[in-house]
Image: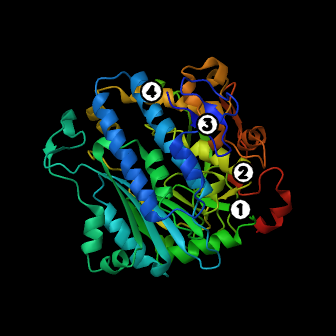
Amino acid sequence: HAEVIDRGGKIISDGNGNEGVGSSVHVAKGAVSRNYKSAPMTLDEITTFLYSFLKKLNSSNLKNKRATFHGIWAAYHLLVVKWLYPWDQEYLRRMPVRRTGENSIFLSVVTYRDEFCPETLKEAFDKAKDPDNLFVGLVQQNCQEEKCRSGVLEGGKIEDVGPDPDCYAEFCESPEGRVYCENGNIRLLRLKESESLGPYMARYFASKLWLGEEYYMQIDSHMTFLQDWDALSIQMLKKAPSEKPVISHYPPPHTADLVAKTKVAAPRLCGPTFATSDLESQIIRLEGSYNYDTVKLDTPRFAPFVAAGYLVAPSTILSEVPFDPFLPYIFMGEEILLSARLWTSGYDIFSPTHSLLGHHYVRNHQPKFWESIHRTFTFGVHNPLQMLVLNRVKTQLDYPESAKDMMKPKSLFTAVEQYSMGTSRSLEEYLKIVGLDMVTKEVSYTEWCETGVPPPGFEKYTNLYTT
């Protein structure tokens, strides 16, 4: 079994599921040699390691083809404890230096077998005010075989299809994209379909392609853009009444006229619900995205939650609220967890003053990542696997039924404190402000979000929102 050692040399898991077993000199030889390095990691160092990890993941998946969901988690956990987690701790110690004052944007784009991805990249650069200052971290998860499988078609059929569109190649070979690829504005990590670990882990990998840009922006790979979206995003961040602002919402559909939308206030994400489906394990879903405001203001309004498919913030969030490498295979839970982690780390969440991007919401018959999980392992294994991993999310959000002492295996909580709530504000305070009771699973109407006024404790900003 591999020990898990944090940046201070303290063992936080002994590989047998035991947490916090004290300090030890038994640091692996590789970890000792790595500790002597202090220079920021280079892109080549980062991608070389990530590709070596993905190769090990591929081998592990083949060995565990017939494993139960517990076996799949155990195999993944072993790999991360041995390789990815120690590297991640080193990475966080040797992150690239953030360059301020240049208004550069790092755009995280994760694509899973998505035909809209090339057009998304083309439009992002075409509509940017300063495209030379835009750097994309592209995590491309594709079926690269000659014979691939479609998504679920009419009547539940799945058919053989050709390889997926190569987003990177299509963009880089296009007249619009060639110069940006030659200048290093696109950083690529390729994953086989069988290596897909879900959208959260894809964003984890993408975040490691950041090389010091001032702002971090996270989007899906099927988006449309308003002209000058990049400059307007930065402008909104600077106008938000916060030292650590995050701007996020569910964008309007791709069919929306974004120019016309500049005259109206953007929708805001207010209404959470506890999921009722057995498959969702009472995780919090964010469903109340509406155009609440009749008046559009220049100052972004406070919001309780972030959306994973559109978020922009100072890139300090990558070091202060780092992605958690122990959250594979999940398709839900990341938004409420990230919202709580950001808020407790001192970040204030806002909705944009007006919509800057559109989103393709309906992608019927397109392949979904859980179908890949079923092909990689066995049919039906994804749901129980996701339910198991979601306990790591629920523990951090204080679901009483997912308390650490009640849950097994204990490996679900390896290094959880390294990737959990911040220390600037309390989780209890956050849950109260956003109206969530984790014990009774009840949601209280908070009013402040729907009416566009600051939340409790932020009344000093009320004058900014009087019309």
Residue type, numbered disc 2 = Ser
Query: With respect to residue 304, does 156 lie above or below?
Result: above
Tell me residue 5's x, y (percent): 61, 38
Report helix, strand or loop for mark 4. Answer: helix
Mark 3 and mark 4 lie on one chain; the one further toward the N terminus is: 4
Nearer the observer, disc 1 or disc 4? 4
Mark 1 and mark 4 lie on one chain; the one further toward the N terminus is: 4
Residue 111 seen: yes
Report helix, strand or loop for mark 3. Answer: loop
Q: Quadrant of residue 194?
A: top left
What residue is shown at x 83% (from left), y 66% (from top)? 463
Tell me residue 53's x, y (percent): 40, 45
Mark pair 2, 1: CA separation = 9 Å
Nearer the observer, disc 2 or disc 4? 4
| Circle 1 residue | 244
395 to the left or right of 257:
right
Q: Which residue lies furthest to the right in this view?
A: 460
Q: Quadrant of residue 401?
A: top right
| Circle 4 residue | 74
Residue type, numbered disc 4 = Ala
Mark pair 1, 4: CA separation = 37 Å
